Image: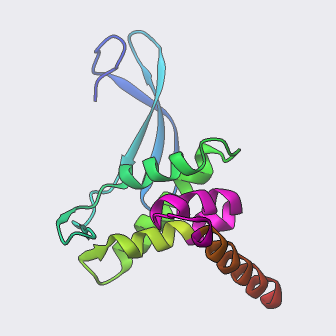
């Protein structure tokens, strides 16, 4: 690793923190310019493939999940940390499943469920894009589904 500021190759790790089961955050300091920066280390994972709605199969890309979530929560007050944790949970679920090819529907359903737990409106906004709502009836059906999920949670508490 080299310093991103001065390109010197001697760095010192000042702090290490496990962010999740899949990544480690490290604060580093350059021995030459003394500037600090953060790096994230991730274990290289088993290759996951995603089957798209049109039948194509492509490599799993967590950045696509991130972009979809960011579109839905753009005007909501949801922390970057919450979004990262949500994506990490989904990725961990996918990796721990026995499947090597996962459908976009399965991924979308996981995002929708977890995002709805964080913020119901963000979940609805994500569903509007993910489920391709075309009319008010679609929104109404999703609201009813969300109410049923919420009522089940209340009964289980």
Residue 41: x, y in percent?
Answer: 37, 46
Looking at the image, can residue 18 be seen? no
Q: Could you tell me if residue 29 is visible in this image? A: yes
Asked whether residue 94 is drawn in magenta, I would say: no
Query: Can you say which quadrant of the picture contains the C terminus?
Result: bottom right
Name the image quarter holding the N terminus.
top left
Is residue 87 rendered to the left or right of residue 97? right
Q: Measuring 59% from the left and 44% from the top, which residue is drawn there?
A: 80
Asked which colour scheme the image uses, the reply is: rainbow
Give the residue drawn at x 67%, y 68%.
Answer: 117
> Which of the pair 106/142 is nearer the observer?
142
Count all numbered tags in the image, as a single digit: 0
Taking 110 as reference, is 14 above or below it? above
Residue drawn at the location 51% of the way across and 66% of the way down: 111
In this rendering, the answer to whether 20 lies above or below 40 is below
Q: Residue 59: image x %, image y %?
A: 21, 60
Q: In the figure, is residue 149 to the left or right of 134?
A: right
Which residues make up the magenta segment? 113-138
Please tell me whether residue 125 belongs to the stretch shown in magenta.
yes
Q: Residue at x 63, y 77 (%)?
A: 141
Q: Residue furthest bottom?
A: 155
Q: Nearer the viewer, residue 109 or 99?
A: 109
* Residue 11 drawn above or below residue 60: above
Does residue 49 lie above or below 155 as drawn?
A: above
**16 sits to left or right of 149:** left
Q: Position of residue 69 (x, y in %)?
A: 51, 52
Q: Main secondary structure of the magenta part?
A: helix
Residue 129 point in image, percent of width and height:
48, 58
């Amino acid at each position: 690793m080299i310093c991103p500021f001065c390109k010197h190759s001697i760095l010192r790790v000042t702090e290490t923190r496990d962010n999740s089961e899949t990544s480690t955050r490290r604060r580093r300091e350059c021995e030459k310019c003394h500037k600090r920066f953060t790096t994230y280390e991730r274990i290289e994972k088993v290759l996951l493939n995603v089957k798209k709605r049109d039948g194509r199969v492509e490599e799993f890309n967590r950045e696509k999940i991130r972009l979809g979530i960011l579109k839905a929560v753009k005007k909501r007050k949801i922390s970057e940390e919450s979004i990262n944790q949500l994506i990490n949970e989904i990725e961990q679920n996918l990796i721990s499943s026995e499947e090597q090819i996962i459908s976009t529907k399965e991924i979308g359903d996981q995002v929708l469920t977890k995002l709805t737990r964080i913020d119901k409106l963000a979940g609805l906004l994500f569903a509007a894009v993910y489920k391709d709502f075309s009319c008010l009836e679609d929104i109404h059906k999703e609201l009813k589904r969300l109410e049923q999920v919420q009522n089940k949670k209340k009964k289980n508490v």
